Structures are given as C-alpha cells and as structure tokens.
Amino acid sequence: MNYKSLNIILMFFLASFIVSSAQNNSVEPENLGFIRPGQMMDIPTSESYRSPYLFRVGISAEMIQFDPETLWRRGIFFESDITPKIRFNTSIVQPPVSIPDTLTKTQFGFHFQYLITKFHDFSISCGIQDFVVEVVASKDQASRNTTGFREMAPFLVISQINRFEDYFIHSYLGLGGGRFSHDLQGELESGSSTGSPIGLFAGFLLRTKSARSQKVWDFIAEYDGGGINIGAKIPVLNNFSCSAGFVNVENLPQWGREEFSQQESPALVVGFSVDFPRPNRTAKERNLPESPLVSGVFTERDSVSLGKTKTPSFESIGQVSVLRDSVLWYKNEVFNLQNSVAKHRKQLDVYIDSIRTIRLSRFNYEKNLNRALRYLYESLQHYQAKDYSRSLEFANRAIDLNPNLALAYARRGSIYYRTGDVGRATLNWQIALRIDPEFTSVKTSLTQIRNQMNQKKLNPGDK
C-alpha cells in the first residue's frame, strides 16, 4: 500500500465522520441479517481473493415479535464485485408494520467496500454501509422521502484465514462508526450524540464440510457493536444456500417479555441466496487464487492440496471453467493428431505398396535375367557346335528378356562375325561396349577388326 492510497483512506474516513456529525437529517437503518456485503450476518468482511461469482442475490426475513402479533422485517439484496478491489451492495428493507400503523416505510440501502491490501492470509478493507434512502407512505397514498447520511457506517476491517485439518476459521476484527459505535435508538430519540464516534466489531466464520455430501457448511458468530449474533449457512445446491440464525442472543431469554430497541431486540432471521458464476474470465483473472469463501463442494483433493500451501484454495467454478477449456483444447489437439496419424498411415500404405512394386519388379528382373543367362548358355552351345543360326536365335531371346545385357550383344556380334557380316558384328560389339565399357574381349575384337581394315587399305591386292 503506497502513501497515495493511505492519504485517500484517511480523507475518506475524515469526510465520513464530518458528514455524520454535520447532518441533522438522519434515518435509523434497519438491521436485517444476511443482506449486507460479505459472508457474515451483520458485520463487514474482508477477503484476500476476488469472488468467482459475478453477483449474488437473495432474500432475508427477521421475526422480531411473536406475541401478541407476529412482526417481520423483510428485505432483498444484490451484491457484485465491480472490480477486483471494489464491492457494491444494494438492499431494500421493509421495517415491521403493525396493524394499527398508518404509515409504511421502505428503506433503500447502498453499501460500498474497498480492498486496501492483502498479504498471504491477511487482508484489510474499508468502506461505507447504510447510506439509506427511506420512503414513507401513508394509507392516503401520500409519501415522502428521507435520506440518511448521519447514521451511515464507515468501517475498517482486518481479516485472517486459518486452516485446521478439514475446516477453516475466518477471523474478522474492525472498527467503524454509525451503527457500530453507539445506541442509535437513544440518540435519535434524544437528538444528541452520547456514545463514542467509533466502535469495535468482531466475528468468526467456521467453514467445514458435510460427511455425506462433501458440501461446505458455514457457522457464524459475531459481535456487531450492539449484540452477539449466531447463524449458519447450509448449501442446498451448488449455487443455492439457505441461512438461519439469531441476533442479540444475549436477550433471547426476555424475547417477547420486554420491549427492546432495534439495536438490542432479539430476533430469528432466515434467508436464501443464489450465486451466479463469473463467465469467460480473462487470462489475468484466471491466474488469481480463488476465494476460500466460495460455497460449493469440498473434496479430499482440496484437503491435501490446501494442507501443503500457505494460502487455502477451494475447487471453484472459475477453476472448473479453466479446466473445461483445457480439456476442450486437448480434445481438439487429440482430434488433430488423429487426423495427422490417419494421413501418415495413408502415406505409409503408399510407401508399402511402392516397396512391394519395387520388390516385384526386382523379382521379375532377376527371373528374366536367369532366363536370359540360360538362353546365352544355349547360344554358346550352338556357337561352339558351329550352328550359328540356332545360336543367333537364343542370343536374340536373351536380348528380348534383358536389353541391358552386354554379354548378349557381344555373343550376337561374334555370331555375325563368324557368318561374315562384319558390319553388324561391329555394331553389336559397340553396343556391348557402351553398356559395359570395361568389356575387354569386346575391345580386343573391335581392335582386330580395325587392324584388318587398315591392312586392307594398305594392301588392296591381298585377300
């Protein structure tokens, strides 16, 4: 936290207390549990992590009297994290109305909270609660509005999270003005401030799990500056939970026997809330740790992993979204790899067919070569027997089977030479020498023919 942030916070508290002291027009805010920001009943909280929920909505009702008639205080709320550090909550509360009353009141409350700093399991937040606009209507439909500045409650709260085996304890300690500091009812009736401008509040939230369903259960105990409240939150479904508790439990023995001010009146409070998950979070938000205050399923994997880390972390909807995206990405990669494997398999089949063709060609070549050599052997037998026509026939068969056989052309050249056809003999020997330039006997035969031809040119009369 830098000096600029510290100056802003100090100016915020100074302005809040100046406004609270200067305003004469005031509205006593209705204390209804489970409608203000955070996970507690009536006191502010601070969290080290941004909630994975886009917003929360819920209803709450408080029975403050059951004899001679039952009186209920009812309300609804909407809560959302505007930024990773700023939380906003608005509520609508209808105070209890007795049958003889001619006026009905409705209070619109606005509550703001700012995360100052965090360090591992600790966090500090400040804010304002109970900026109230009250609408008063009579039976003749006449109405008037009253805005309450004087009793709004600026606060500063410090929180810590501790882990013990399979449960967590969230501790809150803070100070604030307004309803946290003194007896509002007495001040409003007397018109003067008799209490301290700053009061203390504290609370504990025990988070554990159900042995059967593995769902998270919350148990709450708090002191809100005027009395002690206890309650519990029980998950119904993944994003739905029910709440129940008692406020000002120290006065429960006298409930229904004595009249109390609003701050001191014991009551039974019940509520129901719905949490809407945050969709398509950015990569930066996905790297943030999830809040351990998220209601959901507590698994053994959470117990093991959280026991090894200093900061606890639950399996949250945000993490499930990230895992789902990763699974989809890997599925797409697997699909691409399968297509690539199929393509390579087709190429491999082509290569295998090519190899088979080459092997077949080689087999045919070797087969034809063997037959050609056999024909040359037959040709040699007839050549030695001076049966040149049959010898030429077998030599031609060998050339037909293997046109690149130099020995066959050399044999045919020798046959033509024996039959007196020197020209055709020379042509076949030249073909054999072109196929095999190292064919020595063919070179010798061609040299002899050249020498004979040169001798005839020098001695034309010799035969």
Image: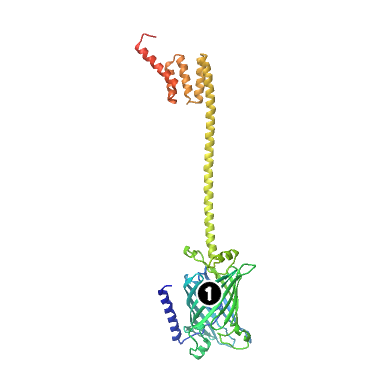
- Answer yes or no: is residue 450 visible: yes
Q: What residue is shown at x 52% (from left), y 51% (from top)? A: 336
Q: Is residue 230 above or below residue 324?
A: below
Residue 47: image location, x then y, percent = 51, 72
Residue in front for this viewpoint, 197 or 275: 197
Residue located at (41% from left, 19% from top): 446
Q: How is the image coloured?
A: rainbow
- Tell me which residue sits at (37%, 13%) in the image: 455
**Camera-side residue: 218 or 91?**
218
What is the x, y in percent for residue 62?
Answer: 59, 80
The correct choice, above or below, for 217 with respect to 96 in the image is above
Residue found farthest to the bottom: 190
Q: Mark 1 is on which residue type?
A: Gly
Quarter in which the C terminus is drawn = top left
**Is residue 426 at all visible to an observer of this figure?**
no
User: For the residue labelled by badge 1, is the local secondary structure a helix, a strand or a loop?
Assistant: loop
Residue 60 or 394: which is nearer the viewer?
A: 394
Residue 98 rendering spot, x and y as whole percentages = 59, 86
Give the tally of numbered discs.
1
Going by the picture, which residue comes out furthest to the left?
458
The residue beneath circle 1 is 38
The location of residue 112, given as percent across then percent down, is 48, 76
Classify mark 1: residues with Cα within 10 Å, few (<14), some (14-19) or many (20+). some
Residue at the outermost right position: 212
Quadrant including the N terminus: bottom left
Rendering quarter of residue 240: bottom right
